[in-house]
Image (tube, helix red, strand yellow):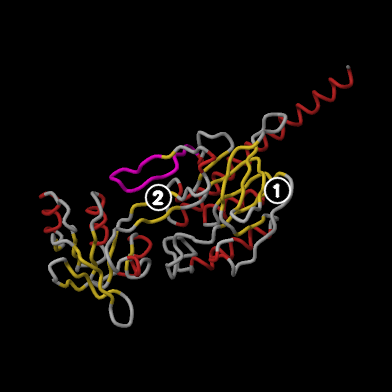
Amino acid sequence: MAEATSAYATDALPGGTVDVVVIGGGAAGLNGALMLARSRRSVVVIDGGTPRNAPAEAMHGFIVLDGTPPGELLERGREQVRGYGGRVVFGEVASAEPAAPSREGDPRFAVTLADGRAVTARRVLVASGLRDVLPNVPGLAEHWGRGVVHCPYCHGWEVRDQPIGVLATGPASVHHAMLFRQLTDDLVYFTRGGELDEGSRARFAARGVRVVDTPVGEVAAAEGGGIAGVRLADGTFVARRFLAVATRMRARTEGLDGLGLPMEDLPDGMGRRFASGMAGTTEVPGVWVAGNATDPTAQVGASAAAGALAAAHINAHLATADTDAAIAAIAAARGDATS
């Protein structure tokens, strides 16, 4: 079990075959598990215990729950899943792969954890989330989720009217800067030595955004915590209270190679995700994906909704498979009776 999860109670893995294993215990995974458990499906959530929004003090943009600490939301979600008979198991997935199907051809999957525990499931919902890859700027990573933010909808209100700097990471950073310009009149765009076309410069000038072309040397910490500003490669210091960075977003794939899920690149070099169709379907029969693993820009509410939709789809497929198996059993019994 990962060290980060040692403080949480973990359920025992059941014997036999469960209906669904959910890989990932964030909003998408827990809401998917909740829907499945309420449909009287046996469901196990495998939670690695390292959610993307762990550094944040609160989540925002989710009606009614706006301002709720991420940890509180997840703890309440686990309790609710357990209240309907679902299980939440903390651990890292070492492997997940197809197993021998049932006699009727219903899929089976074997999921093994890093400590050797294992479970077999009829269906898999991958809600493993993503990792934000930050640019290699000294001092930047230490302030991630606090002085360094990425989403204007998640953190914008909290950083409003402050001196903000945008560190360019690619073409999408220009649009990123315009969203943060809505939140403050004091915005500096650091090109970090990259190219910026004249059209973008004109648009920045029209909105009063200062452009700094000198490469960034480091992010300087303020006394008592937080960010003091940015020190450029030539030694110039630019005071900033917050920095915004459009990260590269990569779906978490550890232990999932055996499923053979197709992946695809995001536009403008923004990252890589699991490819999916309607309701999180994939090209692998019996496997669905939901949340940031396939929709990197989804906030908590959208991820939770995607988990619920995928779960409803999974339950419908299981209901069809259950009926097919019952018909096959009746046919087999009749055949035995007449033989």
Give the x, y percent position of residue 41.
68, 47
Q: Helix or strand or loop: what does disc 2 sit on?
A: strand
Give the x, y percent position of residue 140.
30, 66
Disc 1 residue type (three-letter): Arg
Numbered range of the magenta stretch = 264-278
Q: Residue at x 29, y 58 (%)?
A: 135
Report the residue that reaches farthest toward the top: 339
Q: Which residue is label 2 attached to?
A: 250
User: Is residue 75 depicted above or below 264 in this figure?
Assistant: below
Residue 213 located left or right of residue 265:
left
Residues packed near mark 1 inside 10 Å, few (<14), some (14 to 19) or many (20 plus): some
Residues at marks 2 and 1 touching, judged by CB atoms closer than 8 Å: no
Q: Based on the picture, tell me whether residue 268 belongs to the magenta stretch.
A: yes
Q: Which residue is label 1 attached to?
A: 40
Q: Helix or strand or loop: what does disc 1 sit on?
A: loop
Residue 104 falls in which quadrant of the image?
A: top right
